[in-house]
Image (cartoon, rainbow, N blue to C red):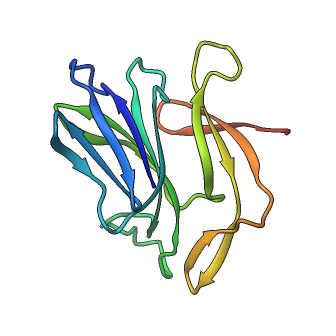
Amino acid sequence: SEIRAENDLDGGGIVEEYILKDNRLTITEEGQLLWQTGKEWDVAGFVLGNVNNDGNDNLLISLWKTGSFGSVKPFWHSGDDSYKNHLFVYKLEDETFQPVWCSSDLDRPIISFEIDDIDNDGLNELVVKEGAYREISKGRYALDTRAPFQVSVWKWEEWGFRFQETLSL
């Protein structure tokens, strides 16, 4: 199955097409490839919206990958890098997707997420249905589909998300 969306993220008047298929996100504009996620990422989902309240929509990607530090691991980090869930936020400028914010391993993996102004203050929040990890082999984790979930609300503050609340269901 595939998930499709359209948006004019850079406000240039030309709509981009976003297609998530086989855990890879491909973005095209007028049939031309703009960007595609690498094979080292397993993309679980994406959402488009103004998550940092700057007036421009962003691309948010929930992905599974190994490691938290990209190509540069801090000297104080020891041990193996685990395969876990991450959240990345991108903006589109000059036909290039640029990272706005990229998380380390998340404490709780994302089941689903959306951008919405749930407290009616005129600013969007990130609403995340979060699950739990299950270790499937040493250092490799998956979503534990039998574990309970929670819904948490996060608000963008300058450079990153700040936890707001856990919603009772």
**Residue 49: % across, % down:** 46, 28
Viewer-side residue, 75 vs 34: 34
Name the residue: 40% across, 26% down.
Answer: 57
**Quadrant holding the N terminus:** bottom left
The image quadrant that residue 60 belongs to is top left
Residue 10 percent across, percent down from the top left: 27, 25
Point out the residue furthest to the right here. 168
Query: Would you say 148 lies left or right of 155 here?
Result: right
Position of 68 with respect to 94 (left or right) is right
Identify the residue at the far front of this view.
1
Return the residue nearer the eye: 77 or 162: 162
Compared to 162, does 19 lie above or below?
below
Name the residue: 35% across, 46% down.
19
Say whether residue 31 is left or right of residue 52. left
Against 7, is 47 above or below? below
Query: Is 150 situated left or right of 133 in this image?
Result: right
Choose between 113 and 163: the one closer to the eye. Answer: 113
| Residue 103: x %, y % from top left | 48, 52
Q: Residue at x 60, y 12 (%)?
A: 122
Residue at image location 30% in from the left, 25% down from the top:
8
Task: Check the image and report above or below for 142 versus 26.
Answer: below
In the orientation shown, which residue stands out farthest toward the bottom? 138
Identify the image quadrant of residue 54. top left
Q: Residue 78 at x, y = what percent?
A: 49, 79
Relative to 25, residue 155 above or below: above
